[in-house]
Image: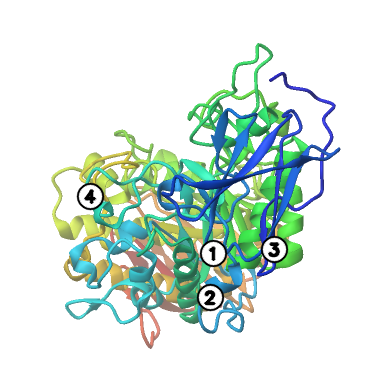
Amino acid sequence: MVLKTDIKTTNKTLGAICTPQQTVFRVYAPLREKINLRLYEGASHVRRAEHPMTKESDGVFSTRIEGDLDGKFYTYIIEDNLEITDPYSTAVSCNSMRSAVIDLSKTNPDGWEEHEAPELNNISESIIYEVHVKDFTAHPSFGVEEPGTFKAFSKRGTKYKDFSTGIDHLTELGVTHVHLMPVSDFITVREEPELRLSDDNYNWGYDPEHYNAVEGTYSTDPYDPHVRVRELKELIMSLHKAGLRVVLDVVYNHTFRSKDSNFNQLYPNFYRTWPDGTLSDGSGCGNELNTEDPMVRKFIIESLEYWTREFKVDGFRFDLMALMDLDTMELITKRLKAIRPDILIYGEPWTGGATVLPSNKTTSRGSQGEKGFSIFNDSFRDALKGDNDGYGTGFAQGNLDKRRGITTGATGSIFFDEGHIGFASRASESVNYANSHDNLILQDKLLKTLPGMSDEEYIRYNKFVHSILFFSMGIPFIHAGNEFMRTKRGLSNSYNAPISINAIDWSLKEKNYELFSFIKDLIEFRKSRPEFKMDDADEIRKAVDFIESQENCYTLGYTIKTNGTYLLIIHNANRHSCLLPHLAIRKHLQMAGKRTILDMEIRCLFNETGIIRGAQGYWHPHGVEVHGISSCVFEIKP
């Protein structure tokens, strides 16, 4: 087929539109001359009925079949030669061999239509927890039947010994959003239940096949196309009832297949190409979607609207978001916020390789300003703990050259002043994190850069990293298991590693409960303090002032002014204690408040042990002391 630019488009609903009386099948293939529909009684049946489809002037092939087709399977035959699945299908067979017709109303669990997501007053209140369904539930220590499934995840009351696991663990921790790594259909695992926990049958899921269908490997019955949909809805409803909002990880930048994909057989313009006709590969996976094409844009937006309405999800994380052209991302944000004004949208502002998409059209760092979506802050990440997989260190490991990156990140990476020039127009545009699923998990990075330490010392460094994250403005994000020092045995890219490496060992919660309790305190403290949820750039600039380090004891400190009092935050990356003298504090407050300070009352609200419950007046004869590799928050009343 020859690609054309003067192709007619359509506004019609595509896919299999099923009612008890009839099903209408529509597929867009403007460059094809003949497409037939094949209907199968079962996913593995050979016998089928074949129906011709009529090509309409807008490039849509359609046919109408009378009767109730719920639970039947189908494919398309292109020009008597190629048999493909329907890229618009909302359900598929086991291992995605055929598309399925389903009546979505039959997939709703009891109470689904009535239940509502928990409220969120402001996006800046978000605290994100990224997790993979199998990682979370597959280890024997999780304590539930059907490990590795949506159903296991949705259970309440799961425990390892006396320690909560699963959803109860998340509510105990206090996060607001659960970011599910890809749960739409991907092609790189076998879905048969007996293979679910096989060590050679694991993948993160960034290999999309059918964007609107639920992945079957997480279903207790992948052979019935209704079950996976119902079980994902049960999980979402269980999370909502627990007060947790749900973010789906979406991969609209590429497909796993390229020239043999169903999209390419129907409409080659679905992919970007270089002038010589070769596929552009900004994803590093063989292709990239041509998001600026009207029909590709229509597909992506309607896909997201489908997930938002049908599954009541509360947000989306975009993989390699820079490959989404900016016009499409703006339209996505507008359309989704029309459905859910409080929806959370964020993504990776980078590509995975060279792309034909012009740089001024990529959704990259800085392009998000005042557009209603957020991006991962890799500059803050690297300043915090060093490079992703190497021996480079950050401020947390004592690299004081990274102080500027931390102070910029602490103010939400806005343009704070000439010395702190960030990319964000408001703090909530910055997603602050130490690691995600990619690259070395935090504990493995610390093991690599600080080898040979005791468990107590590693706990201290983990506390320090998370303190800096949670005492900064922007949206904090943690990866599952960081709260109790999960390790992946030093593997930096575990996307298809054995489940024995990726599964979360819940006994670590017992072993490192001190760290878990501390991070729980961090979240509780952040929620209770509006200072860390400031979003407006002008408000942040007026409220925050940085403190000069004292000679021979370089720390990072700043105050946040609010309602006549100040929060004093000090991060000490030295291995020894540091003292900030009263005189220096008084001088700082006088400059910040432009008034004389004769006396002040100081209380320590948070230190390396967590929240100071019932904090009384803090007294030290010379100033405030912060122990090595720790952070402290003081309240000062002049």
Measure the C-alpha gap from mark 1 to mark 4: 52 Å
Secondary element at tag 4: loop
| Label 4, residues with CA under 10 Å away: few <14, some 14-19, many ≥20 | few
Instruction: Of the two numbered discs 3 and 1 on the same chain, state the one appearing first in sequence.
Output: 3
Instruction: Determine contact: label 1, label 4, CB under 8 Å.
Output: no
Instruction: Please provide percent x and percent y for residue 486.
Output: 26, 56
Viewer-nearest of discs 3 and 2? 3
Instruction: Determine contact: label 3, label 2, CB under 8 Å.
Output: no
Secondary element at tag 2: loop
Measure the C-alpha gap from mark 3 to mark 4: 41 Å
Instruction: Identify the image quadrant of residue 367.
Output: top right
Measure the C-alpha gap from mark 3 to mark 2: 56 Å
Viewer-nearest of discs 2 and 1? 2
| Label 1, residues with CA under 10 Å away: few <14, some 14-19, many ≥20 | many
Instruction: Please provide percent x and percent y for residue 600.
Output: 51, 78
Residue at 39% across, 43% down: 438
The amino acid beneath tag 2 is Arg
Residue 559's tag is: 1
Instruction: Of the two numbered discs 2 and 1 on the same chain, state the one appearing first in sequence.
Output: 2
Secondary element at tag 3: strand
Instruction: Of the two numbered discs 3 and 2 on the same chain, state the one appearing first in sequence.
Output: 3
Viewer-nearest of discs 3 and 4? 3
Residue 548's tag is: none
The amino acid beneath tag 4 is Ser
The amino acid beneath tag 3 is Gln
Instruction: Identify the image quadrant of residue 516.
Output: bottom left
Residue 198's tag is: 4
The amino acid beneath tag 1 is Thr
